[in-house]
Amino acid sequence: MTGSPSFAEAFKVWLKIGCINFGGPAAQIAMMHRMIVDEKKWVDEPRFLHALNFSMLTPGPEAQKLATYLGWLLHGTRGGLAAGILFVLPGAIFMLGLSLFYALGKGVSWVDGALFGIKAAVLVIVLEALLRIGKRALKTPLMYAIAGVGFLAIFFGAVPFPVIVIVAAAIGFFVAQSSPTMLGIKTDVGDLAPPQPDRWQKAGLAAVIGLAAWWLPVGLAVLMLGPHHVLVDIGVFFSKLAVVSFGGAYALLAYMAQQAVDSYGWMTAPEMVDGLGLAETTPGPLILVTQFVGSLAAFRAPAPFSPVTATVIGAAMTTWVTFTPSMLWVFVGAPFVEQLRGNRKLSGALAAITAAVVGVILNLSVWFALHVLFGNVEERHAGWLRWYAFDPMALDVKAAGLAFVAGVLAFGLHRSLIEVVVVMAVLGMAVHVLF
């Protein structure tokens, strides 16, 4: 570390970052680098890059884990907690307000119009994410093959996302041992710092405290409301999601949709598209879209609470079990970060997972396009094979036109995602009123 800020000074900076960290992980990481490394000089370049490498090796939003790790470097456990919580909290509060507005405002003409326009923006946003991540991840023929198989497995085989992650990780783990160049990973990581002598004790203590904190609200919900209450379902489901959340919100949405729409019946497919659009307008990790899902699930099964109270509790439960594990990985793994950076097998597993995520996001792109552009989409099965049946003549011309405009804004005029969402919401309201 190249500077020694006071905890109060660092707290103010983390709060500022939490309030202005729009634009997704790439923009958030760049902002932290500019503020923490270039301007404040609190952390030097090598340590920042080490922290970023570690953040990419574990599930959860990498930008939030990076903030947690940098906070830990500066002020230990309290610094990590402050940085990780403040990175998420402003966006979570904003997302709660949007979720309540959505739940209470549906059926109002201008609200429905805005959501109609946002759906068109989401199509372009997901496509942009597919191109960006694909360009970064698909460097070798094997990586393209993993992405292709991932797409076929989830789109036509309905293979759950966790299974795809596990299989891809296994392939990367073993291939990296003998042929790392097939995965496009570097074999030279430079000099590594010596391991901390008390690292196992620190990791064990962090694991015990973190696991207890993670599952405490879920256990309380079981004791107070029974094992079949929606809050328990929310806590368990999003805890599972937190363990396999490689690749960010775009990769998880297909799995979330499969479970939230088909298994739990919490929402419809178009509402899932709405959730992603709303999440794009908030600061913080895009994975805050999970909070929208949990909020809506609790709103629609509120007993014994009022709908508004249930929405708040559902949002809190979802956010807690989504982000507490991310911080847990940091506190457990931070003492080992240098050695993890030099582990070729783990790097190979991560590279293969990232490639599979490209296939999963392609699946999400097609899934969104079908549900936004066509009126009636039916999921059909024949044995293990799954496909989506729709009428090509039922194309929603208004939705297609708005999607085209969103594409021009994003790819032609290179406007930010926030600008695209806002403009498309306004155009959606105008189309809803005029046509």
Image (tube, helix red, strand yellow):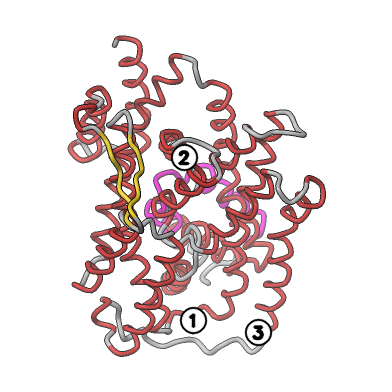
Earlier residue among tags 2 and 1: 2
Foreground residue among 356 and 421: 356
Foreground residue among 12 and 376: 376
Earlier residue among tags 1 and 3: 3
Dot 1 crowding, Cα within 10 Å, few <14, some 14–19, many 20+: many
Q: Position of residue 368 (x, y in %)?
A: 33, 40
Label ID, residue 338: 1
Q: Nearer the viewer, mark 2 or mark 1?
A: 2
Label ID, residue 279: 2
Q: Position of residue 298 (x, y in %)?
A: 64, 37
Q: What residue lies at 48% left-to-right and 80% top-to-bottom?
A: 340
Is residue 221 found left or right of 361 in the rendered image?
right
Between the residue at mark 1 and the residue at mark 3, the CA separation in whole angstroms equals 14 Å
Image quadrant containing the C terminus = top left
Q: Which residue is mark 3?
A: 200
Q: Main secondary structure of the magenta part?
A: helix
Three-letter amino acid code at the position of disc 1: Glu
Q: Position of residue 123 (x, y in %)?
A: 30, 39
Residue 344, quarter of the rendered image? bottom left
Three-letter amino acid code at the position of disc 2: Ala
Three-letter amino acid code at the position of disc 3: Trp
Magenta residues span 5-34
Is any atom of residue 394 visible in this view? yes
Outermost residue, top direction? 434
Earlier residue among tags 3 and 2: 3
